[in-house]
Amino acid sequence: MKKSVLSAALGALALGVAFSAPAMAADVSACLITKTDTNPFFVKMKEGATAKAKELGVTLKSYAGKIDGDSESQVAAIESCIADGAKGILITASDTKGIVPSVKKARDAGLLVIALDTPLDPADAADATFATDNLLAGKLIGQWAKETLGDKAKDAKVAFLDLTPSQPTVDVLRDQGFMMGFGIDTKDPNKIGDEDDARIVGHDVTNGNEEGGRKAMENLLQKDPSINVIHTINEPAAVGAYQALKAVGMEKNVLIVSVDGGCPGVKSVKEGVIGATSQQYPLLMASLGIEAIKKFADSGEKPKPTEGKSFFDTGVSLVTDKPVSGLESIDTKVGTDKCWG
């Protein structure tokens, strides 16, 4: 996405959400609940929420799981937000199904609940979702990998480094999107692991971090050492996979693709560790979320989805220094200008 296009898109976002902030509601408080407080993606999300809360005079409390997948801490955080009388909650759920009863309790108590990045299951369990189009993010890197390999794609050996066993929606969307872009029949697009394409070596989970990525890659290499394409849920997992490949001298034989677009991830693309990544914009998600809570507190109005979609789309760009014909992308120089973390 060119800079002028992105600027126009961000302007449209601001207009679309239309957040004026008249002093109609006193003592507005909000909660941000992320999967962890260490992943750069969630660090930037917290930064965006904090800055916007300060700007609008909203009191913000932040919570996070101990690790990606720690749903119990998120449930406890929701209980605290209800007890504190918060007007709204922004949440990136670790267990997109398991958290739904707690979210319902918050909504029944009058709180506005907005899912950030990761849609709940079902998506309408939240009042709104502000997110990257994660299916599109997966499709972009899948299509890039397919076009990059050319005729070799039909004989590829593909490994999937996923998130957690609970298969949160963000994991499923990126995973299935990659398959669609690469030309793999997804079977049930709402489920990971039911595909029967002979090119798929297997799936393993990473918890979205480097150590998990390294271990998952080691496991999959034991299953089939001829793997030459790897889809990773995020860039920390991709770096871990690269470490495992490098340890056995395979780092130059495998194409790694990912999603996030954080500054370390874009640097990994520039250095050739990752071939391509889909960049998303967590600061924007969180800042718009705080604006939505403030507007809800002032007027009772809830945010609306992007036209033609079931969620509010905060944008995605393919980042690679090896563009392919027919697929729009930005290079790592532009990606660095727009990255986070």
Image: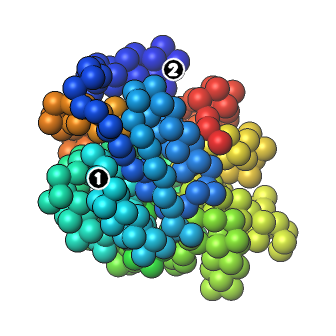
Report x, y in % for residue 6: 46, 22
Report x, y in % for residue 178: 44, 56
Residue density around tag 1, few if under 14, some if 14–19, many if 20 or more, within 10 Å: some
Kind of residue at badge 2: Lys
- Image quarter where the C terminus lies is top right
Identify the residue at horizontal 23%, vertical 60% (top origin).
106
Identify the residue at horizontal 48%, vertical 52% (top origin).
62
Report x, y in % for residue 262: 62, 43
Mark 2 vs mark 1: in front? 1
Q: Quadrant of residue 271?
A: top right
| Residue that mark 1 sits on | 85
**In this rendering, position of residue 107 left or right of residue 152:** left
Q: Secondary structure at mark 1?
A: loop
Q: Quadrant of residue 193?
A: bottom left
Q: Secondary structure at mark 2?
A: loop
Report the front residue among 124 and 175.
124
Name the mark on residue 2.
2
Residue density around tag 2, few if under 14, some if 14–19, many if 20 or more, within 10 Å: few
Q: Earlier along the polypeptide chain: callout 2 or callout 1? A: 2
